[in-house]
Image: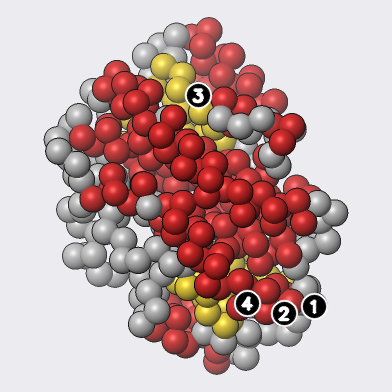
Amino acid sequence: MKYKMYEEILEQPDALRKTFANEKEVMDLVASKISSISNIYLVGCGSSLSTLFTIKSALNMVTDLNIDVFTGYEYFYNKNLENKDVIAIFTSQSGETADTLSSLRLSKEKNIPTVSIINEKDSSMFKEADFSILTHSGHEEAILGTKTYVTQLATLYYILFSASDYDKKDEIISYLHQIPDLMDDLINKTHEENKLLAEKFKNEELFYCMGSGPNFGLAYKLAMTMFMEGALKNACPLYSGEFRHGLIERIEKDVSAVFLDAGYESDIFTEKSIEFSKNLGVNTIIFSLKDYVDLNEFNNLLAPLLLVIPLEWFIYYLAHFNNEDPGSTRHIGKVRY
């Protein structure tokens, strides 16, 4: 049986192509506005929050941009927001996420310029922001987000790196346009191996998810919206460098841990954690960028856009082998706060 998520995995490359083709003009305009501003607020929840963690880490590694990341409710209740020389970017799949929408409206009251990156053109956030970028993913059914994740993240890379002082920003933009073709290749190449991997781990109930730099955002998404919402497995995200606190005392033989490795300088801690875990007999599941692309011909700051593909197949089949639809939910959308 094929669930809706299966089709949505396959549709990701075209969703990216359509987004770049249709939104370039507004993305360039937004990038131009940001380039003259000193402070950037990034606001989102769930999978959208994970894209913000990723882009903030990527930019912090190579630029001087001053960026703060907030969940919707943290932003709304923050009493220290600036309203001069600042811009706020809001990310959402639906464009109706209550706390994010409230934060956008608060920004308007405070005269903070607003940008929305949204997948629904008729949504409140798309209509109310000063500048709105549409991610051309079509209506997405799978709760964990596939097309909306990659289009949203790629849009953030495009506008923020274009606005930055990074000396290789043109390289980043060039690689972004290559991502759809690389995704097409990975969708085919990583399908079967991750189906087998999921079958091997189908009976596991807890997964620790670790990454450094931009990959922490992906580890957060993996745990929060992929394992827990999609595969209905318990999961916990962790910075690789924080393995030595807390988890090092709980990790043991036959516990399962997923490591994301992109060859960052900070991945020295990822490698140390992997070595320690292997020596204990931990079920180490490693997704390494070098297994999918030549690191000499790709900028590893963009790693999450590629590593997410094999992870999606793994989660899809993990749900499938447990007779769960990875796109359905039990409580999300039904319980309101």
Rendered position, 187 above or below 253: below
Q: Which mark is residue 67?
A: none
- What amino acid type should be assigned to the residue bearing mark 2? Lys
- What amino acid type should be assigned to the residue bearing mark 3? Ile
- Are there few (<14), some (14-19), or many (20+) residues within 10 Å of tag 3? few
Q: Earlier in the sequence, mark 4 or mark 3?
A: 4
Q: Which picture quadrant has residue 125?
A: bottom left
Counting from the top left corner in percent of width and height, residue 21 is at 55, 67
Q: Earlier in the sequence, mark 3 or mark 2?
A: 2
Rendered position, 319 above or below 255: below
Q: Quadrant of the N terminus?
A: top left
Could you tell me if the residues under marks 3 and 2 are in contact, i.e. CB atoms within 8 Å?
Answer: no
Counting from the top left corner in percent of width and height, residue 217 is at 54, 47
Q: CA distance from mark 1 to mark 4?
A: 18 Å
Residue that carries the numbered disc 4 in the rendered image? 25
Is 176 placed left or right of 16 in the picture?
A: right
Q: Which mark is residue 286?
A: 3
Residue that carries the numbered disc 1 in the rendered image? 36
- Which residue is drawn at the image coordinates 46% and 51% (left, top)? 13
Could you tell me if the residues under marks 1 and 2 are in contact, i.e. CB atoms within 8 Å?
Answer: yes
